[in-house]
Amino acid sequence: MKAILRSIFIGTCFFLFILLVSTGSASCQKISQRKVPRTIVTTDGEIDDVDSFLRMLLYANEFRIEGLIYSSSMWHYKGDEKGTLFTSEMEMTRKLYGAKTSLRWPGTSWMNPLLDAYEQVYPKLSQHAEGFPTAAYLRSVVRVGNIDFEGDMHADTEGSDFIKTKLLDDNLEPLYLQVWGGTNTIARALKSIEDQYKGTAEWGTIYAKVTKKAILYAILDQDATYRNYIAPQWPDLKVYYNSNQFWCLAYPWKRAVPPSQQYLLEGKFMGEEIIQGHGPLLSQYYSYGDGQKQEGDEEHIHGDPNRLVEAQWGSFGVYDFISEGDSPAFLHLIDVGLDNLEHPQWGGWGGRLVQSTSQPNRWEDGDGVLDFNPYTDALDATYPQIRWIEALQHDFAARADWCVRDFAQANHPPVIRPLGEVRRVATPGEKLTLEVATSDPDEDNLTTHFWLYSEVGTYLGKPLLDQKENRLEIQLDPESTGELHVIASVKDDGAHSMVRYQRFVIQVN
C-alpha cells in the first residue's frame, strides 16, 4: 500500500511539473535545482558512443548536461567536402587508413532519434526520480563542433563557441568536459579564449577562472590536440585520463571481465533485461547480431547475425554487449556514496585514477593503479573498474525498467547514511565503531556489507573486523599508521538488486 500511495504522490507531482512546463516556465524546462555536477559531452559518434549515450540518458538526472557536442577523432571525421586528403597524426590510424578524404563519419543527426525516443519514455522515467531534463532542453544544448578532420581546431565552430561561453560564464562550479572522441573541439574553445585574452590585463584572471572550473575526463588520446596544445598551453587544467580501466566496458571486454561475470554482458541478460521490451529508446541500443547498422560507418558489421564469429574481439552471440568505452566519463559523476567526484584516486563507478608524479594536475590509471583481482588472484590494472560491473549492470537493468514501468512495479536504489563522522582520526591499536542507517523506497530487504578498500590510502596494517548487521567494530593494528578506507555497501533484494555505499576514511596517526 505504501508503494501505491508513493506512486500516486509522485504521479501527482509529475502532473504539476508538466503543467508548469506547459505554461512556459523556462526553469522547469531544464532540470531540478538539486546540486549535481555540470557536464558537457563531446563525442565522435562511434557505435560505442551511441551506446554510452543511451545509458547516460537513463542517468541524466544525476548530473546537469549543459552541452552535447559533435566532434571528430582519429577514427571518425567528416572531411572538408573538397576532396582534401588527410593522413592521421596518430600512429595506429595512420597505418590502418593512410590518406583519406573522410573516415567512417556517422553524421551530425544520430542524436535526434535517440532524443525523440527519450521524449517518449520521459514521462515514465520522471516517475522514478526527480531531475530528468526534458528532451526539448537536451535538444537545445546540441551543437556541432570541429568535425572536418582528426585534430581539427583551426577555426571557431558553433560547438567550440558553446564550450567557450560555458568556461567563461559566471557559474564557478566545476564543469566536467567529457571527451568521448578527440579533444579538438575543447582545444579550439581554449585557443579562442587564449587568442582573445592573452596579452591583456584580464588574462591572468581568465586563465585562473578556466583552469579552476574545467575538468577533462578523457578516454585515451583520440587525437593529438591534448599533447600538442592543451597540455603545454594550459598546464594547470585538471585532466582525468583513463587509458586502461575502460577496456572492461569496451570492445575487448571478454579479455578483461572474469568469466563468472560475463553473463552480465551476454545476450540473455542484455537482450531480456535491457534491450527488448524496454521501450523505443533501448530498442536502439547497438548489440551483436541485432540487425542494426549505423549509417556512415562501413566497419559497423557487429549487427550482422551472419558474421558473429568474424568479430574482431572474439565470437559473440545475439544481443551480446559490444562496447561502451566512454561510459566511465559519466559514471564518475554519479553520486552512489563513494565520494569519488573530487577524489578520483579513491575509486568509484568511473574507475580509479591517481595523481601523476610528473604532472600534478593530471590523474591517470595504468600500471601504477592496480587493484587485487580475486578472480585471477593477481593485481590488475583493469580491476578498479571491473569490481563495479555487477552493480553497474543490475543498476542499468533496473533503470531500463523505469522506461516502461510505473514506480510500484520497478526497483529503486536503497538509501544509506552514516551514523557519526565519516572522517575519523585514530591511533594505532584503537578500537572504533562504524555504523550506518539503511532504508529502501520499495521496502525491500537489505543486506549491508563492510569491506576494506585496501588499495586506496596508505594504511598497510591488517585490522580485525567484527560486523553485526549495520555496525562494524574495527580493532586497528597496533603497529600501523596511514589512511584507511572502509566501505559500507547496502544491497536490496529487489528485481535487479541495486547497491549504494558509504565510505569511511580513518587517518591513523
Image (tube, grey):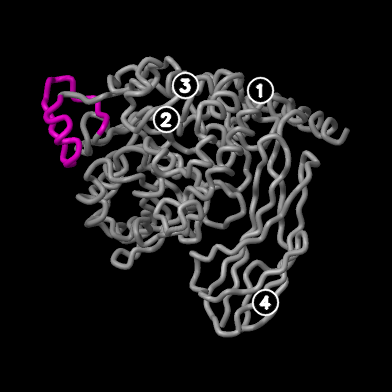
Few, some or many C-alpha atoms within 10 Å of disc 4 (few <14, some 14-19, many ≥20)?
A: some
Q: CA distance from mark 3 to mark 2?
A: 10 Å
Q: CA distance from mark 1 to mark 3?
A: 23 Å
Report the residue marked by disc 1. 404
Amino acid type assigned to the residue bearing label 2 in the image? Ile
Marks 4,1: beta carbons within 8 A:
no
Secondary element under disc 3, as helix, strand or loop, is loop
Q: Which residue is drawn at the image coordinates 56% and 83% (left, top)?
A: 509
Q: In the rendered structure, which disc, 3 or 4, sits on the residue that comes first in sequence?
A: 3
Q: Which residues are magenta?
A: 75-100
Q: CA distance from mark 4 to mark 1?
A: 48 Å
Q: CA distance from mark 2 to mark 4?
A: 45 Å
> Where does the image place residue 391, in percent across and percent down from the top left?
59, 44
Amino acid type assigned to the residue bearing label 1 in the image? Val
Note whether residue 23 is visible: no
- In this rendering, which labeled residue sits more in front, label 2 or label 1? 2
Q: Is residue 280 magenta?
A: no
Q: In the rendered structure, which disc, 1 or 3, sits on the residue that comes first in sequence?
A: 3
Q: Which residue is drawn at the image coordinates 14% and 35% (left, top)?
A: 95
The single residue placed furthest to the right in the displayed view is 1
Q: In the rendered structure, which disc, 2 or 1, sits on the residue that comes first in sequence?
A: 2
> Where does the image place residue 471, in percent across and percent down from the top left?
75, 64
Asked whether 76 or 225 is in front, the reply is 76
Q: Is residue 94 magenta?
A: yes
Q: CA distance from mark 2 to mark 1?
A: 24 Å
Report the residue marked by disc 4. 475
Report the residue marked by disc 2. 322
Q: CA distance from mark 3 to mark 4?
A: 51 Å
Report the residue marked by disc 3. 318
